[in-house]
Image (spheres, rainbow, N blue to C red):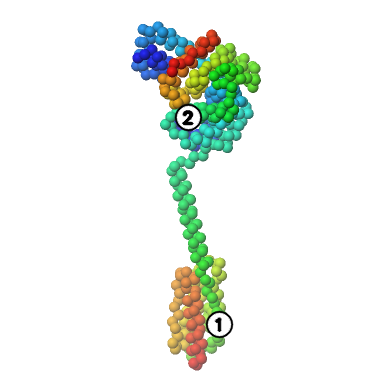
Amino acid sequence: MSCEEIRNLALLAACGEASASDAAGVSEHASACPACAAEIRALKEGLELLRHAPREVPSRRTQEALGAMLLREAPVRVAPALRFWAAAAVALVAISAGLLAWKLGAWQDRPAPVIVKTPIPVVEPKPPSPVPVKPAAAVKALAWVPPAAADKPTAWSTTSLDALDDVSSALSHLGGSAPVLSRPDPKAVWFGQAASATDALYDGLDEISTTTDRF
Amino acid sequence: MDLDFVRQCQRGDPAALAKLVDQVQGPLMGYLCRMMGDRVRAEDALQETMLRALRALPDWKPSGSFQGWLFTIARNCAMDVLRERPMASLDGEEGPGASVAGNEEPAEDRVDRGIMTAKLQEALAGLPKDQREVVSLRMYGGLSFKEIAKVTGCPLNTALGRMRYALLNLKKVLEGEVLEERP
């Protein structure tokens, strides 16, 4: 090993960065090389001088600027796991919002049932009829107006269903070719059933009128 | 610097960041003063260093030392500031040490530094730039010689040689003899 290399190693050893074997090699060389021994002494004295290094402190103005910078530029780092869950939550919210918008859109796109009001016929119940007809219920059913489109869709109301039953029952007692009015599924979505049920009601009323004319 | 502490800083912990700035501003300022020769430019470079460091902090990975990373940023900032506002000399021809210890510093503080410190400051200012840089990184940053070699982009033996000649020059500068390291 050359003197130059030994002196570099000596510097590392003096700074505590050399291995024990390298430090031993430096000592061994220095004991036999006065020039290297002299430089190693000088290096150690130089390192000692560095203890008196002038201490520098930024001015108050710079320190204030650094403080303001710290508030402005502080890093915000989201942990990878948290980042995944945050992305999942955002995706879930987006999907939910999309579904809701689609549902509302579908609801609003459906045409509201058009009710053509027919004059209510005066139904005179046949006296010997074993089952009394309930014209009031039938009238009530006919007077039923579907809810506004903005309202939340609901199932058939009990009153409307009862009225339908009454009309159906009256028709069966009047005889003839009265159609059987099927009771709509109370849990069915309002729109799908409303139009057909309304049609059935009016068909029933037509039948009532026809049958009554026969008497 | 403790890795857990740096992690805290990376997460944006305000207390840790404040402590970090408090701990590094002095050493960075010392290094920049030695490298740039005057306080005004050194303080500009310090602010730029901290700005870049804070922005890049979340991406720092512990593959190297944190101090080495920080002083590399400081070195680049110093070069950028000097490129924008070049000084007359970096090699001590104009005695940059005098302007570093210039008028902004209160006189009583300068007295308190002691004679040895004042002489050392003058001796440091008289060193060739490469030697001054290695000494400053060691003295203020506490970097190992491997880290110094990495920051300055030179082989380890070159960094060691510069340091050796710098130390010898510090002893001899008063005699007016400045040594250059062998290539």
Determine whether, in the image, residue B50 is placed left or right of residue B157: right
- Crowding near pointer 2: few (<14 within 10 Å), some, many (20+)? many
Left-right relation of B87 to A210: right
Viewer-side residue, B127 vs A215: B127
Q: Secondary structure at mark 1?
A: loop
Query: Looking at the image, which residue is at 49% across and 92% down?
Result: A214
Asked which quadrant contains residue A27, the reply is top left
Using the image, determine if residue A176 lies above or below residue A185.
below
Disc 2: host chain: B
Q: For mark 1, name the chain.
A: A
What type is the residue that disc 2 sits on?
Trp
Asked whether residue B59 appears in the rendered view, the answer is yes
Residue receiving disc 2 = B69
User: At which x and y percent is residue A33?
Assistant: 38, 8
Residue A131 seen by the camera: no
Q: Residue at x 45, y 31 (%)?
A: B3
In which image quadrant can residue A143 be found?
Answer: bottom right
Give the residue at mark 1.
A118
In front: B137, or A125?
Answer: B137
Q: Nearer the viewer, mark 1 or mark 2?
A: 2
Report the amino acid beneath label 1.
Thr
